Image (cartoon, rainbow, N blue to C red):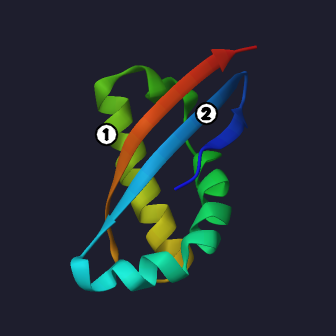
Amino acid sequence: MPQTVVNLQDEVVRIQVTLQVENQDRDWLGSHKRALSDLLPIALTKIDPDDLHSEQGLEHLREQLRKDLNQGMETDKIQSVLVNELLTQSR
């Protein structure tokens, strides 16, 4: 997925994620990449910025993004969300 930047309360968050799907769902992922890119910033606004500062919080972030993206796409094809890059900056 492309890099996404969002404002969460008093923090700016830059994140890049990889979505994992079953091998047979790779074409689905490719054809829905734009819609997923549009949903990602919306899903991120539901995240507590404090979660971004601990391992347990990052695990919660990954699971919440997986659930929100699947729900937004009305599917269960996204198996996991991997965080490739995460940068936070306080204002």
At x 68%, y 39%, the residue is 5
Q: Position of residue 24 (x, y in %)?
A: 26, 85
Q: In the displayed structure, does residue 84 sit left or right of residue 86?
A: left
Q: Position of residue 74 (x, y in %)?
A: 49, 83
The furthest residue to the top: 91
At x 59%, y 44%, the residue is 3
Q: Position of residue 11 (x, y in %)?
A: 68, 23
Residue type at the position of mark 1: Glu
| Residue identified by numbered label 1 | 59
Q: Position of residue 79 (x, y in %)?
A: 28, 66
Q: Nearer the viewer, residue 20 or 62?
A: 20
Q: Relative to residue 17, is residue 14 depicted above or below?
A: above
Viewer-nearest of labels 1 and 2? 2
Neighbor class of circle 1 (other Cα within 10 Å; few <14, some 14-19, many 20+) is some
Q: Is residue 13 visible?
A: yes
Q: In the displayed structure, does residue 30 sit left or right of residue 58?
A: right
Check contact, mark 1 vs mark 2: CB within 8 A. no
Label at residue 14:
2
At x 55%, y 71%, the residue is 33
Report how far apart the C-alphas of labels 1 and 2 lie in the structure.
17 Å
